[in-house]
Image: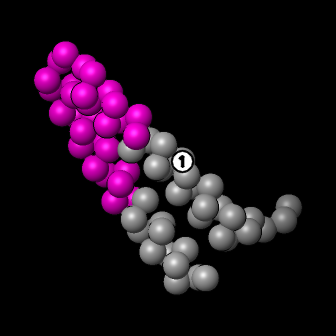
């Protein structure tokens, strides 16, 4: 089993996290249920934080 390339893995994860932020924000805006919309809004914020951390790590490795 070969080791994963760190930068490639981080880039792939960053893309995934950014897509989740977009999706969660969209869900939060379109849902009529305030509590569920708020939950998705919090999910978006958490994923945005993860994306920022991944981006910072990528910048350190470049």
Q: Where is residue 31, by image quadrant? A: top left
Looking at the rendered structure, the secondary structure element under dot 1 is helix
Residue 9 x, y percent position in the rendering: 65, 61
Question: In the rendered image of this protein, does residue 8 appear above or below residue 45?
Answer: below
- Region in magenta: 22-50
How many discs appear?
Answer: 1
Q: How is the image coloured?
A: one colour
Q: Is residue 39 magenta?
A: yes
Q: Where is residue 13, by image quadrant? A: bottom right
Residue at 31% across, 37% down: 25
Q: What kind of secondary structure does the magenta stretch mostly adopt?
A: helix
Q: Is residue 37 magenta?
A: yes
In the rendered image, the quadrant that contains the N terminus is bottom right
Question: In the rendered image of this protein, does residue 7 appear above or below residue 39?
Answer: below
Residue at 53% across, 57% down: 14
Q: Is residue 41 left or right of residue 16?
A: left
In the rendered image, the quadrant that contains the C terminus is bottom right
Given residues 4 and 21, the one toward you in this image is 21
Q: Is residue 48 left or right of residue 6?
A: left
Residue at 39% across, 44% down: 21
Question: In the rendered image of this protein, does residue 29 appear above or below residue 17?
Answer: above
Given residues 19 and 36, the one toward you in this image is 19
State the residue lying farthest toward the left: 34
Residue 22 x, y percent position in the rendering: 40, 40
Q: Is residue 28 left or right of residue 14?
A: left
Residue at numbered disc 1: 16
State the residue lying farthest toward the right: 1
Residue at 27% across, 22% down: 30
Are there few (<14), some (14-19), or many (20+) residues within 10 Å of tag 1?
some
Residue 15 x, y percent position in the rendering: 55, 52
């Amino acid at each position: 089993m070969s080791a994963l390339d760190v930068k490639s893995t981080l880039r792939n994860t960053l893309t995934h996290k950014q897509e989740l932020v977009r999706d969660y924000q969209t869900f939060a805006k379109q849902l009529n249920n305030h509590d569920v919309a708020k939950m998705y809004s919090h999910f978006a914020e958490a994923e945005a934080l993860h994306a920022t951390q991944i981006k910072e790590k990528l910048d350190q490795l470049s």
